Each structure stands twice: as structure tokens, then as C-alpha cells.
Image (cartoon, grey):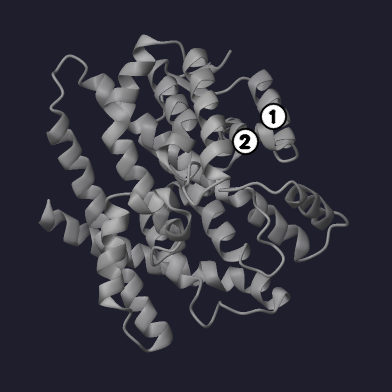
Amino acid sequence: MQSRGSFTLDDTNYFKGIAILLIVLHNYLHWQVGFSIENESDFTANNAQIFLENLYPVQWPNFFVSIFSFLGHYGVQLFVFFSAYGLSIQFIKNENSRLNYFKYLKTRLKKLYVLLIFGFIVYHIFFYIGFGEVYSLKKTAVKSILLSSSISNFYKPWTYNMLSGPFWFFGLMVQLYVAFPFLFKILKKYKLALILATTYVLITVLYYTVDKQTNFNILPSLIGHLPEVFLGIYFAQNKLKKPSAIVFISSLVVFSLSQVYEFLFPFSFLAFTLVLLYIFENLYIVLGSSWKKIFVSIGKISMIIFVTNGIFRILPLFDIENMDIRAERIFLYLILLLPTCYLLYFIYNKIFEKIK
């Protein structure tokens, strides 16, 4: 039903390279007035209609901005999938040895928190360069606690307001690392179909009773991303690399309907993850070696791009209202962002080598 094999490190970086570009383009373009139309942490049925209206007739910049504003945030799902996949591969390799949970958690969280600290430093440097003032250290301390504990992921006014909007992903990763050994064991014991069915009942109930009725988040937390996590574990345990054409078409149909009918909305994230895996795995086959190398090299620095693009997009050079200028300036934005991130990646590695 699916193609078999295991993702290599280059394969993973290839997907991460494309995923981070989707995320960067989304983060930059969806701030354009009238184009914050994605169904991400909440749902509006009219968003899909606006999206389609902007696609035809094909005009610059409506078409370009709409594509990445509406769909670019799904790059996050690929990062969740490959995080679960990578952890699963390590667990499978060490299956015969007894897991020291606290040692495992300490190792994982240490790497995550070092990146978080580095991200805060980068944020403050660019904030000062862009605005000529120092960001509040008190606010930084408070937000670092909320992020590192993942508390901010559960409360809507905080989730995307932790210094840089993309930083909410740190909280999600904290939750994933804490819960992963238990999730891995669950999928070894029970069938994927049963787990997904149970998970979706849980997500749907919480979405309608908690998420829609209160200020508490469900979708940006681990609960909302459990399907992609279990999919990553399943692919690793069964040595799969790509969903079948039937799964791809079915997922595309489910995703399309999920943007119109709210009761299907919680299914959209897993559905589009499968769509992206199918498209980008097939694209890998036909891409020239030069493009593959570009995506792989971008994937290697994807987490540095992740912590940098949030502050980079609000620098005065890029934070402009005129739609045509803002859309066209995305090319200058990428030309400046990527080399900057390669330099920061070099600095980060030097610091991390000393810390670990």
C-alpha cells in the first residue's frame, strides 16, 4: 500500500528544507492585510472561499500570497512528523536496552533549551538593530518560563505572543519529548487505525467543548498534533517512506472538505501531512541534483531559520503595508535571511559544541 524503506539523514533534511521554506513564506506573507486566511488554530469556513477567489484569475501578487498564506503553515506538520520519526528510529535501535527516561528527557530538553536561549539572543540582537532599543528583560524572563514549560501553548492570548510568533513550536516539542516514550509503546501495542480513531474522538470533543468555548488551546498543543506523531512512529516502525496514490487522493479529498466543513477540520492536519509526503517524495525523484542539494542544505539549518525568521520579518525593511512591495520584497527577504542563518548556524554550532 505504501513504498517501503527508511528515510536517510539527507532525506529528512530535504523534507525539512522544503518545510521551513513553506513556513517562512507563510510567516512573512500571511501578515499582509486581507491574507490572514489560514485555518490553523481556529476555523472559518469563509477562508477557503477567499482563498479560491484569490487564485483565479491568476494575478500577481494575489495568487502567490494566497498559496503560501493559506497552505504554508502546514510545513509545521512535516516537522512534527519527522521529529516523531527520528525519535522512533533511535528508540528502535536501542530497543534491547532499558530506557532511562530521565536521562533521555534531560538530553532532549537540554538541546531544545540551548536552541531556545540562542533564539532569544538572536531576537534581542535584531530587535535592537531594527528598533534601536532593548527588549524588556523582565518580559523575556516571563516568556522564557512560559515557553520552556509549554504553558503558553495551552492559553490562546499567549501561544503566538512569546517574543516571536513561531516560538510556540518550542512548547509543542517540550510536550512531545515528555510524552514520546509512552506514545511509542502505545503504537507497538495497538493498531494505528484504533489509535487514530480514539485520538480524533478526543480532539473533536475537546475542540468543540474547550477550544471553541474558552481561551484554552487544543490544536497548538501535543493533543492536536497526536495524529502526525503517531504517523511518524508508524512510518518508522514499518519502514515506510511514502503513502500510496489511493491514500494521497483520499487525503486530498478529506483536506479539501475539511476547509469547508468544520466537523472535519481536526482531520486536516494529518490529511495534508500525507499529501505533502506524497508530493515531495515524488518530487525528489524528478528533481535535479542541484535542487536536492539546495533543499538538503537549507534543511540542515532549518531550526536556525525557524528561530530567526520571526524577528527578521518585522524589521523596518520588510514590515511594510503596500501589498505589491511587500510581496516582491520576499525575494530580498530570502536573499538576506538565508546567508544570515548560515552564519548563525556556524556560531550556534561553536557555542553548542562547548556546552555539550
Residue 259 horizontal/vertical position (percent): 71, 40
Q: Amino acid at mark 2?
A: Ser
Note whether 32 is above or below 112 in the view shown. below
Note whether 194 is above or below 250 in the view shown. above
Residue 44 visible? The answer is yes
Instruction: Please tell me which residue is depicted at 80% across the width and 57% down the height of the picture.
Output: 54
Instruction: Please tell me which residue is depicted at 41% across the width and 48% down the height of the picture.
Output: 154
Residue 302 visible? The answer is no
Note whether 271 is above or below 172 in the view shown. above
Number of other residues with Cα within 10 Å of mark 2, as a class: few under 14, some 14 to 19, many 20 or more: many
Q: Are marks 2 and 1 in contact (CB under 8 Å)?
A: yes
Relative horizontal placement of residue 255, taking residue 8 as reference (left or right): right
Q: Amino acid at mark 1?
A: Val
Residue 265 horizontal/vertical position (percent): 64, 37
Instruction: Please tell me which residue is depicted at 56% across the width and 50% down the height of the picture.
Output: 73
117 and 355: which one is in front? 117
Q: Quadrant of residue 61?
A: bottom right
Residue position marked by numbered label 1 in the rendering: 254
Relative horizontal placement of residue 79, taking residue 242 as reference (left or right): left
In which quadrant of the rendered image does the N terminus lie?
Answer: top right
* Label whose residue precedes the other's in the sequence (2 or 1): 1
